Image: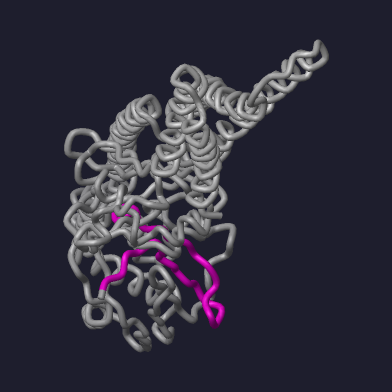
Amino acid sequence: MNDRFPRILGSAIILCVGLASIASAAAHIPNEPARGVLFGVVPPLILSLGIVSVGGMLGSGNLPVDSVWRLVGWMVLGMLSAAGMAVLVIEYEAAHGVTIIHSFNVIVNSLAGGATGGLVVGYYDDRRRRWLEKHETTKRILETVRQINEHVVKAPDREALFDAICAEFAASEIYTFAWVGVLDPDTETVIPVTSAGVANSYLDAIEISMDDETLSKGPTAQAIQSGEIQTIQQIRTDPQYDPWRSTALEYGFRSSAAIPIQLVEERYGVLNIYSDRPAAFQAREQAVLSELGDTIAHAIYGLNVEQQQQEQYQKLERENERLDRFTSIVSHDLRNPLNVAQMYTETVSETEDLSYTDKIADAHERMETMIDDTLTLARDGRVVTDLQRVDLPSLVDQCWDVVDTGEATFENLLETAIQADNRRTRHLFENLIRNAVEHTGEAVTIRVGPLDDGFYVEDTGPGIPEAKRDDVFAPGHTTADDGTGFGLSIVKEIVEAHGWDIRITDGENGGARFEITNVETVE
């Protein structure tokens, strides 16, 4: 219901009482002596003018409707009390044989005095009531902020923090809805990331844009631009809220606040809070909410620093693991062909039988291959930092052309491009294709195709038993006589260096299927 009509109705009642009192007092002026006018007409006339003034101010002011009607109630109570006392006095005097002249005028004047007294009492009563409500509201705000501060300390990441903040505001008795939005730098629009409360569908019906002349004048956009809290105390009448007013009123919103969450020039988002009460965000509340915005911004900064430290720690752990694997390869896997070469060298030295030189050459060739694979493993395992657009269909065709595939057949179903390191992505496909040919025979069919968030490489070979699927990625693991066992290790290193995921499943025709997911595609 529109707040304006009940406010005007209440003020009109007060105004009518004042005007009626003025008319009644003025009607007695011609028949009253000077002293009668001075003491019987002027005082109620002055009081009536005051009543009229109060009625006019209430009609054009912003006093809450319940306060207006509280004043009306006190005024009526004062009038009834004063009129009742006047009647009692008149009847008491009549019981003693005294007739009060103009008794009706006495009652009317008492009504004016009672109305004035009632308005004065009502004013202080309403002021006290609003002070108590404000005090209680402040307590609830501080309690909500205290709960949020606990989440600030415990939240594991930004998303969880935003969720908890909105949930706490929506669960409080003083707010009905809360949401957090972030600025999309590409579209210059504010995108909601989380919300809680009575009107989640409200966000589907509104748009906030920073580069639109109208949509950029609202509190959310202004909070982002100024870095200061913005409030709308009267959604029904504030021109800033024109683009969203009808929708907001439909959901029962009467006032709102937009609190920027930013630290210096770093913008993390904007917190929007709504209340079903007009003028719900006064100076005290604004100060508390503004400070809360700063606290949330510092918490997010701390979470970002912690995340960076965790990433650095994980990167260091990853480098240590790679170093351990490299050490293991050098100390164990390379030692085997080296021992073979030394053994045959001693045999040649002792027997002068040069037929063993071929075996020595084979051992050295195997060591050279293992060294190359080891260097590739070390190089391709570093985290990818320079991404570029990689056209998968053409790259996979090129990989097929450079690998010795014999009689194997090939199906390339890829059609998209991805963000990746070109050289390492090439190594990934070359090793997967080579692995399929070496372990399944030359008559194998190899198919490369798309997934919702990545791609797959599968073959028509015997497949890999589920119990052994984790083992195939270990350095040195191979079932081929001439394999080094590093191909799939290199594949896994490349996948992890990109931040992708890999798993082995059964192929469409029973062979092995390698699925690489969490891959970013591009147009």
From the viewer's perspective, tell me whether residue 408 is left or right of residue 146.
Answer: left
Q: Nearer the viewer, residue 500 or 467?
A: 500
> Which residue is drawn at the image coordinates 68% and 19% (left, top)?
100
Q: How many marks?
A: 0
Q: Quadrant of residue 241?
A: bottom left
Query: Where 85 sits versus 199, above or below?
Result: above
Q: Nearer the viewer, residue 209 or 436?
A: 209
Q: How is the image coloured?
A: one colour
Q: Quadrant of residue 409?
A: bottom left
> Which residue is drawn at the image coordinates 50% and 26% (left, top)?
32
Q: In the rendering, at what x and y percent does residue 487 appear?
A: 33, 62
Q: Is residue 302 visible?
A: no
Q: Nearer the viewer, residue 466 or 144?
A: 144
Magenta residues span 496-522
Q: In the rendering, at what x and y percent does residue 466 appear?
A: 58, 62
Residue 345 is a magenta residue: no
